[in-house]
Image: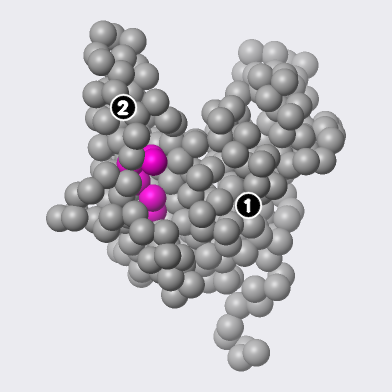
Amino acid sequence: MPANEPEKSQLKYRRVLLKLSGEALMGPGQFGIDIPTCITFAQAIAAARAEGAEICLVIGGGNIFRGVAGAAKGMERAQADSMGMLATVMNALAMQSVLEGIGVPTRVQSALSMDAVCEPYIRRRAQRHMEKGRVVIFAAGIGNPFFTTDTGAALRSIEMNCDALLKGTQVDGVYTADPKLDATATRYNQVAYDELLIKNLRVMDPSAVSLMRDNNIPIVVFSLKEEGSLLNVLHGRGTSTTISKKGASSE
């Protein structure tokens, strides 16, 4: 192996899907896209790619429009969800621009046809992009209303044959209760899919967790706030919670 080629075997997870909430792109703001925050995420993705990781992304749209919220205010749900899907495309294009600005080749594939701004979702084309070292951002969920971007992330991680789905959040894993509300909450090192569902630990949409369980792909929940956290997860170190078929283990 050439000296400058990444040692891919050192990675615990080589091909991954990174799920980011739309709210994560707001940074310190209350709405929209904070470019310095996007640059921070892009640099972390670039560092992971430099070590041999193959990365695809799904980004929510809650920083711009959330379909459920629109429906709660009286909008027809399918229409509101369609607007939410468009918000995810906007986030995907913003992240693509930032990634390419630091030299990371990136493709956006949308489940809704909009050929003027991005590619349509084609599974084998997306796989080929990843094999060539490109970051692929999947937008517009699965292209249908009534499904969350969590479910879209689960589906795409299965279709891309990912080793894991990485869920970047504001906390460093899954807790027995909301740590912001319960000071006695403890963090799980690992927790089984079924226990997560039974205890209603709402880290991801239940349908997404069920999909991952049925295809035996682990979900790793980690904090976006910690510097180097993405690389740590890829190497199997640092603080996180792994959701898999193994039983629960808490600190």
Q: Quadrant of residue 240?
A: top right
Q: Quadrant of residue 186?
A: top right
Measured in 3D between alpha carbons, the distance from the residue under mark 2 to the one under mark 1, in whole angstroms, is 27 Å
The residue at the point 57 percent across, 71 percent down is 52
Return the x and y of residue 174 as percentages of the image width and height.
68, 31
Q: Toward the viewer: 187 or 90?
A: 90
Q: Which residue in the protein does label 2 denote?
A: 81
Q: Is residue 139 magenta?
A: yes
Q: Is residue 197 left or right of residue 207?
A: right
Q: Find disc 1 in the rendering and name its residue.
A: 164
Q: Nearer the viewer, residue 43 or 68?
A: 68
Q: Which residues are magenta?
A: 137-142
Q: Position of residue 233 (x, y in %)?
A: 66, 53
CB under 8 Å between discs 2 and 1: no
Q: Is residue 83 above or below residue 224?
A: above
Q: Which numbered dot is residue 84?
A: none
- Tell me which amino acid carries mark 2: Asp
Q: Position of residue 169 (x, y in %)?
A: 55, 36
* Residue lying farthest to the bottom in this orientation: 2
Residue 34, quarter of picture: top left
Q: Quadrant of the C terminus?
A: top right
Q: Residues within 10 Å of mark 1 (few under 14, many from 20)?
A: many
Measuring from the top left, give residue 54's x and y in whole percent: 53, 65
Q: Is residue 168 left or right of residue 149?
A: right
250 and 119: which one is in front? 119
Q: Residue at x 56, y 66 (%)?
A: 53
Q: Considering only vertical position in the picture, is 52 above or below 201?
A: below
Q: Is residue 145 above or below residue 131?
A: above
